Amino acid sequence: MSPSFGKCFDPDGTTFGVPTFPWKFAPDGYATRRQLRARGLRPGGQPIAAQVMRRARRRKSGVLVAYLYRIDQAKPVRPMTPGRAAALAKAMSARRTCPQCSIDAGYCIPTSLGMCVTCAYPQDQTTAA
């Protein structure tokens, strides 16, 4: 067993408080939030059941942790209601509308510019034509 594998292997949870497994070695029946979402499920208020860890040199702590939830206790994703759909459409429309020219840009306005690309760089648009 490699040293990094042994540091992450704690199926009893004595070291970290929850069962811990090396990356890609979690037992069946557990899934991350993204994996649950891909199956049309959500954690549904259940506590963290386990975690997977791996070394990450670029992180300050030196490890990357992903929390796992039990699939059998997960609940289905709540359906989209008409009110939520309308609110989401309104929010996305606000993100696409340029405050300078009030035109729907067709993409989300970059927050770094604060306006559509055409308004931010008008000189580049005249030379490209």
Image: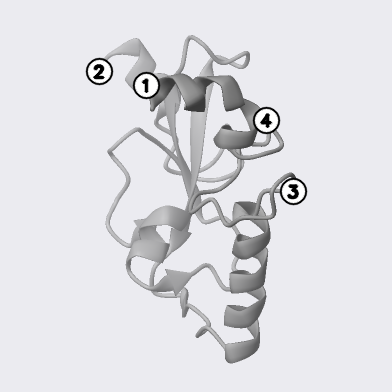
Q: Residues within 10 Å of mark 1 (few under 14, many from 20)?
A: few
Mark 4 element type: loop
In this picture, residue 59 sits left or right of residue 76: right
Image quadrant where residue 97 sits: bottom right
Residue 36 % position (x, y): 40, 63
Quarter of the image with the C terminus in it: top left
Amino acid type of disc 2?
A: Met
Residue 40 % position (x, y): 38, 73
List the residue tagged with mark 1.
Answer: 6
Q: Nearer the viewer, mark 3 or mark 4?
A: 3
Amino acid type of disc 4?
A: Leu
| Count of numbered badges drawn on the protein | 4
List the residue tagged with mark 2.
Answer: 1
Q: Residues within 10 Å of mark 4 (few under 14, many from 20)?
A: few
In the depicted structure, whether residue 112 falls above or below residue 49: above
Amino acid type of disc 1?
A: Gly
Q: Nearer the viewer, mark 1 or mark 3?
A: 3
Instruction: Decide which of 77, 114 is in the foreground and name it.
Output: 114
Query: In the rendered image, is residue 41 in sight?
Result: yes
Q: Earlier in the sequence, mark 2 or mark 3?
A: 2
List the residue tagged with mark 3.
Answer: 99
* Marks 1/3: CA–CA distance: 55 Å
In this picture, residue 20 sits left or right of residue 117: left
Identify which residue is drawn at 57% across, 88% down: 81
Q: Earlier in the sequence, mark 1 or mark 3?
A: 1
Q: Earlier in the sequence, mark 3 or mark 4?
A: 3
List the residue tagged with mark 4.
Answer: 113
**Residues at marks 1 and 2 touching, judged by CB atoms closer than 8 Å:** yes
